[in-house]
Amino acid sequence: MSVVGGPERAAGQRDIAVGAGFEAVFLDPVGRMVQQRWADAAVSVAFEELDPVSAFPVVPGRRWGPGLWWSATTGRHVASGSQAMRVQLMVLDRDRRVLGMAGRPVRVLWRDGRGWVGSWVPQLFVRYADGTGMLADCPSHTEAGGQRALTAAAVMTEACAQVGFVYRRLERLDEVVEANVKWLAGYRHPRHRGRPGLLERVVNVFAQPLPLVEGVTAVGDPIEVLPVAFHALWAGLLVAPLEVSLHERVLVQVEGGSKPNAVCGEAW
């Protein structure tokens, strides 16, 4: 199968029976285009370390375009194509199972039942600690991409199943949860651990559930301590209910305890 000069059919056509297996196209670490069997690439290529195989499109008139997300997980930037994708990167960056992420690192090719070449570039690849991977798209709403995207999703699901990966169309978060994740993401950088020993003190003070403001003031000056508490919440060392807007009396406790309930109060 070749991507050069070959006829390419829209992925939205109904006839998607894969007749000749899948192939992968990607840029190797020195920027050369490589094409090989998908089954081989899936076990030998660190997609999470690769640059995008093709750039994210720039849509005229859209207020938010492609950019880069600095990942606290990897310490590197991840290419992002939309605001919806950026939020999903935030969620995955907090997931302790995740080891690496990359934006559009691989194009998957297949032939349909009539011999036409189909092609799809998932927006995101995620590598998990157990070695498995996830290809994902980050639609802004359930119907985004139309039938072409939905048909490609079915093909990607099959391709991933063959190599022990998964494919997902990641759903948008609840508005309140999304706002909270965005807020905490602002404190993801290690500099928000504070001076030596401060992070440990902050975590220890919430050994039992406490309103955020009480735990913070028990440790010291809120101007110094609050960023550390937010970093601990981002990193999962502390937990709080994200289904309600974060506020000064939200209950916070160490990770692993019983899920705290929200405390009523004015949102920040």
Image (tube, rainbow, N blue to C red):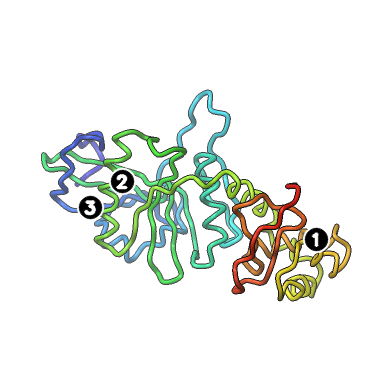
Residue at the image position 79 percent from the left and 67 percent from the top:
215
How far is disc 3 from disc 1 in space, using C-alphas? Answer: 54 Å
Instruction: Describe the element under mark 3 as helix, strand or loop.
Output: strand
Label 2 SS: helix
Q: Residues within 10 Å of mark 1 (few under 14, many from 20)?
A: some
What's the amino acid at mark 1? Answer: Val
Residue found 48% across the figure and 57% down from its top = 101
User: Relative to residue 86, is residue 254 depicted above or below?
Assistant: below
The percent coordinates of residue 88 (x first, y second) are 51, 50
- Residue 242 position (above or below residue 239): above
Looking at marks 2 and 3 on the same chain, the residue that comes earlier in the sequence is marked by: 3
**How many labels sit on residues?**
3
Observer-nearest residue: 135 or 58? 135
User: In the image, is residue 252 above or below residue 185?
Assistant: below
Left or right of residue 8: residue 193:
right
Q: Which residue is mark 3?
A: 22
Name the amino acid type tagged 3: Phe
Amino acid of disc 2: Ala
Q: Nearer the viewer, mark 2 or mark 3?
A: 2
With 60 as the anchor, is 109 left or right in this view?
Answer: left
Q: Position of residue 192 (x, y in %)?
A: 74, 61
Q: Which mark is residue 153?
A: 2
Which numbered disc, 2 or 1, marks the residue that appears first in the sequence? 2
Say whether marks 2 and 3 touch (CB < 8 Å).
Answer: no
Mark 2 and mark 3: Cα distance apart in space:
14 Å
Q: Residue furthest top?
A: 61
Q: Which percent across, then down, holds residue 60?
A: 50, 24
Residue at point 53% right, 28% down?
62
Residue 74 vs residue 92, the one in the foreground? 92
Q: Nearer the viewer, residue 138 or 263?
A: 263
Mark 1, residue position: 213
